[in-house]
Structures are given as structure tokens and as C-alpha cells.
Amino acid sequence: MGIYLNPDNIDFKIAVNSEIYVDKSMMIKCINQVLCTEQRYICVSRPRRFGKSMALNMLTAYYSKGCDSHELFSGLKISSETTYKEHLNKYNVIRLNMTDFMSRGNSIEEMLDYISRRLLHELKKSFGDVDCFDWSDLISVLEEVFAEKSIPFVFVIDEWDCIFRMHKHDFKAQTVYLNFLRDLLKNKSYVALTYMTGILPIKKYGEHSALNMFTEISMTDIREYAEFTGFTQNEVEVLCQKYGMPFEETRRWYDGYNLRGVSVYNPRSVVMSMTGGYFSNYWTSTETYEALKIYIEMNFDSLREKIIRMIAGESVKINTGKFQNDMTTFKSSDDVLTLLVHLGYLSYDFDSAKVCIPNSEVHQEFINSIEDGGWELVRFG
């Protein structure tokens, strides 16, 4: 049991023991279906505070050989599935949160070197009996450990896109990082699963598109993962009944994310309103409205007009296909609005290709962003 290699289940245990825990363990059934297949690479992008880390903690607790999670999962929905015991705590898990390494070095190369050395240190502690040719070569060691032990690795990577958010204009560093991930993961027989999460989908970079083996799950194409993205209506109704909170008002405040026919609620806001007993801007309060203001004040084709229409309650048709999956390459209002979908400020309807402001909580954030921005006076009934 290590810090990054085969970690324990303490983080998921904390989530399960919390006052409000909504069981999303059936997501494991979907993941088990792609283990050790060509579809074993999954990249999930969601807005901040939408349960990304909780999902990674759950997968770590389930797959890691560094713990015994039978008791932890025994009361959850996944425990009734036929594949549950087959995969429980049977894999070598490497768990990384990329934000933890951002200060490790003065360059991206130094940061990646630090990650490699930390992983090699733990691999040697756990598999020192394997006669590896070069204990300083991470990929070579992973290949030889797998060849010797016949137990593949599950890579669980949180905040995979932090480099693209923190170093928006450093394209060289971004390319070096993408090459590192590609060389570590792509077409490697030692990989049973790679599950990455972030806010942005994978950056489009010509030949580096970038990790084209990944199935992308995003707020513009959620595929079969809609019910695991936030709280569903049925889950919120149960919580409202338990905590004596009015459901219709909860829906007005926090509903509105239409993901392939599944109505999804902001999980952080629902939890805060249930435990606090009142409605407020919980999700948006974790980040200043200036972050939204920067984007909606960009002077692209009819962007201001589209924002005003959405504040008034309309939906606007957009083309998400040209978005470059970063926070700097904007060529149209569609690019900006697509980014706002990924950030959680807009809801995207896949069938109509339209966006709208999802709920009262986010609506107020748009109002705050335009109040002192020199916008023409807009009145709403």
C-alpha cells in the first residue's frame, strides 16, 4: 500500500460516511465492461464540484490491491452485480492528482520527471523482487512488472487538464505533457484501465489529438454516463423528503442540466441546501463571477446578443464541433459558449444542439457578470 501505487480506500470511506451520500456505485458496472478491452481508456470532463474526485475515490477503493473494500461496498448497489467480486481489489492501481505536482519543478519536464521518480520509488518498494533491466525507466519497469506478475495496472488520474488551465499559453509545455501521457498509456498491455477526469475534454492538437484512444465523456456528449454526472431527479426528490425541503424550489434553483434526456442537478448545491436548510448560490460562490465575466465580454459574433437572450430565458443554437478544448483558442461565439457548457454555466441539449442557462443559481451569476460591464440596460419580468 503506497501513496500513489495501490492506495487505500480512506477517501471513499469518508464520502460514504458523510451525512449525504448518494450511491453512484453502478458506474463501476459500466467501467467493468471495458476493462482490458480496446475501450479501456476513458476521459470524463465535468464542471468543478460535480463529483469528479468522488468517482475517482470510488474506483480507487474498488480496484486497488492496497486495501480490502468488501465491507465498504457490501451495502452499495454494485455489490449485487455478477462481476462485483471478480474485480474487487484485484488490480495494481496508480492514482495521481496532477495538481499535486504542479509546484514540483521549474518546468513541465521537471514536474514529469518528479512524477516518474515517485512512481519508480513505490514500484521498487512493492516489486523489488522483479529483475528489472533499468529501474530508472518508468515504462520499462511497468512492462516488466506486468510480465512477471501478470496483474495489469489501473490508472486513475484526477485534474488531468490542470496544465491547460494553469499554463494556458505555454503550448510547448502542453505538448510535452501530452507526449508523456501518450507514451505512458497508449497501446500498453500493462494498462487494464485508464480513467481520467478534468474540466476540459482532451486538447485537439493535430497529430496529438492528443490521446485519440480515449472515449470522451463530456457535458456536450455524456454517452451512457448521464446518471453518474450529478444528482438525478429521483435522488433529489428523496433528499427533499428526508430534509423537509420543497422539491419544486430545489428544482428551480439547481436543476437544468439536460444530459441526453436525464435531468441532472448540481450535487454540491443540493447537498449544501439540504444540510443548511435554505437555498442560495452555493456552487457559484466557490468562484468569483469575474471568471464568467471574462468570457461573456469577449467581442465575438453576436455573443452579447446571445447572452441577453439566454438571460431572458431563451435557448441558443451552437456548433460545439470546432471548439479546441482549451481556454485560449476562441474564434467565434460558439467556442465561448461551448467552453461555458464545460464549465457548467450553460446546459447543452444534445438533440437540438441548443444551450441555455440551467437554473436560478447560474442565472444570478450571469446577472452579476453584466451589471457593471457597460451592457445596455436589460429588464426581465
Image (cartoon, helix red, strand yellow):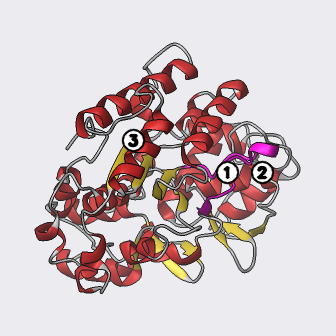
- C-alpha distance separating marks 1 and 2: 6 Å
Given the image, on which type of amino acid does mark 3 rest?
Answer: Leu
Residue at image mark 3: 96
Residue type of the residue flagged with mark 2 = Asp
Rendered-image quadrant of the N terminus: top left
Residue 99 image position (x, y, % from top left): 43, 34
On screen, 368 above or below 321? above
Front-most of 19 and 106? 106
Q: Is residue 207 magenta?
A: yes
Residue 96 in view here: yes
Image: magenta residue range: 199-218
Q: Residue at x 69, y 75 (%)?
A: 350
Front residue of this view, candidates 152 and 281: 152
Residue that label 2 marks? 335
Count neighbours of disc 1 (C-alpha within 10 A) and say few if under 14, some if 14 to 19, many if 20 or more. many
21 left or right, relative to 158: left
